Image: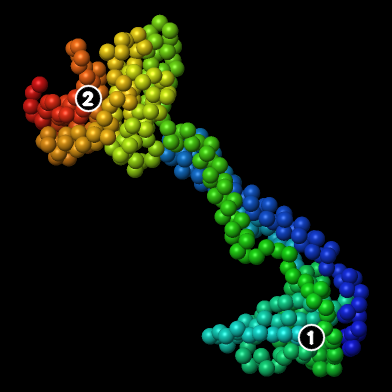
């Protein structure tokens, strides 16, 4: 069979038919990676679209995301039921191999993993090196030793796929006992060009997150801001040169974020000031997640409120005072209304209103957040 005293194992190394095989396998690996990337990204985007649609209450987006998921599931079902007859792997061939080295890993089972370094010597091609790992029974391990000859099964198109035949036929056992195989050079070592399992997992995760992030970025305006009153500001009735009035509102992002958090009110006021392009307004309304302003540029400065002059950092204390001292034991909502003061030299007027099952109550404060009046539940006025 041409394996005895193989001098050609060290000759004509370049004739080993590995590069064309690697090219074909590399192309298949690239197409598989591309397909996995696209499917993972589309899946992540579809799931993100469903979540975004629920948050912003957009039915078309929800239907689009759900439809894409249904299509992906149908494609997966059809692909799973497709007959794999055209994709059957090529049959393996039997050859002899020289054991260059082996190392067993301790295990708790009867079969332990053994790492082999082999020189595979097929009948129809030059010998080459390969490194494999195979589970061998503890009883059979003594049969394998360095410089020994083993019977293996290999795949011509994928020479890195080698399996030691544990129970060879009598003919191959005889040939293994009589054969002498020279070691192939290290330069003939063949390895699988495919990505490892960990690389596939990382690619899938990255593509999935990238698809989801893209959808979130596309809908970031609807997710993180709300300008319901801004539309009114752009309409002819509110932005015409005749009335010169304006209004705008915004909401803080996230259901767990409140305007009572330290610093959030002032930052939101600065955002509204930039939006309406003036710091002088005629009314400010602050709720748990929403702040709105209204104004009229024809008003004199004395009849307006300067957005940045208010003590926003003290307003949460006023809300706590109103919710705990005005007879509303279980307040369901609160609101702060800031309007210009009346009379010469009067500062802005701040009113905090709380509502609960017992009714509505409020307290008034001046521009320094000093309480000037209280109206508990049941009091008139």
Does the image show residue 232?
Answer: no
Q: Where is residue 120 in the image (x, y as percent from the top left)?
A: 80, 80
Up the image or down, 297 lies above or below 44; here it is above
Query: Circle 2 sits on which residue?
Result: 367
Q: Position of residue 307 (x, y in %)?
A: 32, 24
How did the renderer colour the structure? rainbow
Q: Position of residue 15 (x, y in %)?
A: 90, 71
Q: Quadrant of the C terminus?
A: top left
Up the image or down, 351 lies above or below 72; here it is above
Q: Which residue is drawn at 83% across and 78% down?
A: 185
Q: Where is residue 244 in the image (x, y as percent from the top left)?
A: 39, 10
Q: Nearer the viewer, residue 4 or 164?
A: 4
Horizontal placement of 379 versus 19: left or right?
A: left
Q: Which residue is drawn at 42% across and 20% down?
A: 277
Q: Are marks 2 and 1 in contact (CB under 8 Å)?
A: no
Mark 2 element type: loop
Q: Which mark is residue 148?
A: none
Does the image show residue 299?
Answer: yes
Q: Residue at x 56, y 42 (%)?
A: 214
Q: Residue at x 12, y 34 (%)?
A: 326
Q: Nearer the viewer, residue 309 or 284?
A: 309
Up the image or down, 86 lies above or below 95; here it is above
Query: Circle 1 sits on which residue?
Result: 98
Q: In which quarter of the image is the N terminus?
A: bottom right
Up the image or down, 303 lies above or below 88; here it is above
Quarter occupied by residue 310? top left
Horizontal placement of 7 versus 318: left or right?
A: right
């Amino acid at each position: 069979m041409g394996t005895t005293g193989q001098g050609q194992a060290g000759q004509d190394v370049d004739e080993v038919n590995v590069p064309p095989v690697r090219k074909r396998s590399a192309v298949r690996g690239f197409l598989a990676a591309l397909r996995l990337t696209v499917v993972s990204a589309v899946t992540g985007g579809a799931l993100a679209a469903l979540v975004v649609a629920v948050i912003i209450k957009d039915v078309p987006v929800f239907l689009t995301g759900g439809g894409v998921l249904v299509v992906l599931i149908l494609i997966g079902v059809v692909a799973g039921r497709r007959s794999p007859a055209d994709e059957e792997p090529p049959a393996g061939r039997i050859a002899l191999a020289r054991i260059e080295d082996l190392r067993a890993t301790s295990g708790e089972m009867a079969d332990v993993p053994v790492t082999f370094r082999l020189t595979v010597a097929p009948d129809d091609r030059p010998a080459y090196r390969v490194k494999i790992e195979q589970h061998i029974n503890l009883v059979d391990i003594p049969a394998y030793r360095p410089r020994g000859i083993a019977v293996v099964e290999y795949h011509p198109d994928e020479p890195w796929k080698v399996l030691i035949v544990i129970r060879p036929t009598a003919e191959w056992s005889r040939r293994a006992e009589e054969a002498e195989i020279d070691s192939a050079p290290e330069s003939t070592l063949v390895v699988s060009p495919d990505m490892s399992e960990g690389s596939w997992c990382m690619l899938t995760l990255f593509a999935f997150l990238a698809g989801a992030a893209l959808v979130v970025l596309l809908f970031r305006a609807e997710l993180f801001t709300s300008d319901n009153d801004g539309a009114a500001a752009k309409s002819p009735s509110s932005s015409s040169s005749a009335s010169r009035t304006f209004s705008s509102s915004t909401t803080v992002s996230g259901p767990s974020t409140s305007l009572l958090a330290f610093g959030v009110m002032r930052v939101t006021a600065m955002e509204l000031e930039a939006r309406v392009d003036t710091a002088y307004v005629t009314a400010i309304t602050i709720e748990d997640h929403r702040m709105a302003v209204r104004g009229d540029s024809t008003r004199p400065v004395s009849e307006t409120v300067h957005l940045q002059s208010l003590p926003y950092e003290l307003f949460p204390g006023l809300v706590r005072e109103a919710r705990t001292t005005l007879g509303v034991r279980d307040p369901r909502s609160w609101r702060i209304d800031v309007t210009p003061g009346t009379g010469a030299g009067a500062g802005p007027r701040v009113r905090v209103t709380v509502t609960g099952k017992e009714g509505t109550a409020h307290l008034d404060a001046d521009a320094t957040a000093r309480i000037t009046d209280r109206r508990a539940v049941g009091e008139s006025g």
